[in-house]
Image (spheres, grey):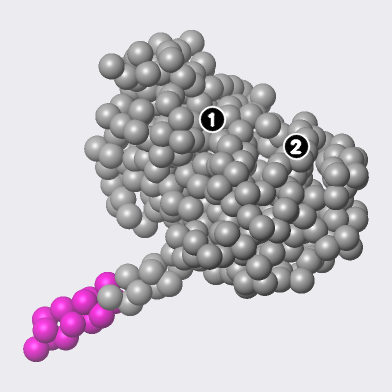
Amino acid sequence: MFKLQTLLASTLLVGMTALASAADRPQTVGPKGEAPTPVATLELTDAEVAKVAEGNYTAAFAWHELYDWSNAVARGAKDEFERLGIKVVAETDAGFDSARQKSDVETIMANQPSIIVSLPIDPTTAQTVYGIARDAGVKLVFVDNAVDGFTHGKDYVTVVSADLVQIGEKAARALAASMGETGTVGYMFHDADFPVTNQRDQAFKWTIENEFPNMEIAIESGMTDPANAEDIARAMLSRNPDLGGIYTPWAEPALGVLSVLRQQGNDTTRVVTIDLNEPVALDMLKGGNTAAIIADEAYSIGVYAARSAAASLLGKSVDPFLVVDAITVGTDNVTEGWNKSMKMDPPESVAEAAK
């Protein structure tokens, strides 16, 4: 009887622990805590598309910075605007300078656009950036970030982003698979108040700690400047020379980590990172330390940013936080993954290495 009671108590404890773990599992939320809505739920009928095309609407982009990822987002939005008969009249690149972004929006407003698609650099001060457009009745659609003090449905249409927790989970599972689900991990996280990277990083950590009992995060190091990634990697490896894997929050710091591993002749520590990048992809394909790259469907973010603006012009309500899926890119699906994320072929060097 005692053995039975002990067994029942043990089973109950395991079940309660599993429930607690499930309850603690990170969930992707929007900039204002909104629940995510899959982008595929937003559709326009042929009649609605025709009505938009009759409106002679115009659109503009006020980008935070233009590089591979944001260019893919922009291309998706431009293609969708073309399908909808909406003319793009301006596009700016703020070089990640919030003051310049404010000036960019003021310049854009001279074109009197119906729509502005933008990624706010500093949500806390962005009211001063976008207030002029909001007050003029421009339909504002944001990527990744919202604007503090702005109200969904009144001041802006929606925020379009990725399923951030899914990205972190896939990064953890890819790294675990490359390590045989055993060993120690170095966790390099973005040490700044930025919800996009924060949610990805935290999901990675939670997944390693809760799904892989034979793996351990042996060392954690915050990073604010990618230029410091090499120093962080050296410190990690100095304290833990047998690290089986290292996580980096995006591709640029990953390049620093890979550089250190090459300098040290280390061909065993596996690396996983986020966002497609030519040098990282080449390292992976040529048998380097990179185990996998996690990407989002960047092109689709642009498509649905444009589509949500059009829906708003028709008076349709749009959910506050729309998300696309994440993609695990490995040696066996580089070309497919690049196409799915960016809607374009990979760089020639990557395509050649993938053959």
Residue 104 position, x and y percent, is 85, 40
Q: Which residues are magenta?
A: 1-14
The quadrant in which residue 98 appears is top right
Left or right: 322, with 336 as reference point: right
Instruction: Give the labeled residue for mark 2.
Output: 91
- In the displayed structure, 223 sits above or below 261; it is below
Is residue 5 part of the magenta span, yes or no? yes
Residue 29 position, x and y percent, is 57, 63
Residue 135 position, x and y percent, is 89, 63
Q: Are marks 1 and 2 in contact (CB under 8 Å)?
A: no
In front here: 142 or 252? 142
The numbered dot on residue 75 is none
Task: Identify the main secondary structure in magenta.
Answer: helix
Q: Residue at x 38, y 69 (%)?
A: 22
Mark 2, secondary structure of its residue: strand
- Determine the residue located farthest toward the bottom in the rendered image: 1
Q: Residue at x 69, y 64 (%)?
A: 313
In front here: 132 or 259? 132
Q: Amino acid at mark 2?
A: Glu
Instruction: Give the labeled residue for mark 1.
Output: 251
- In the displayed structure, 175 sits above or below 345; it is below
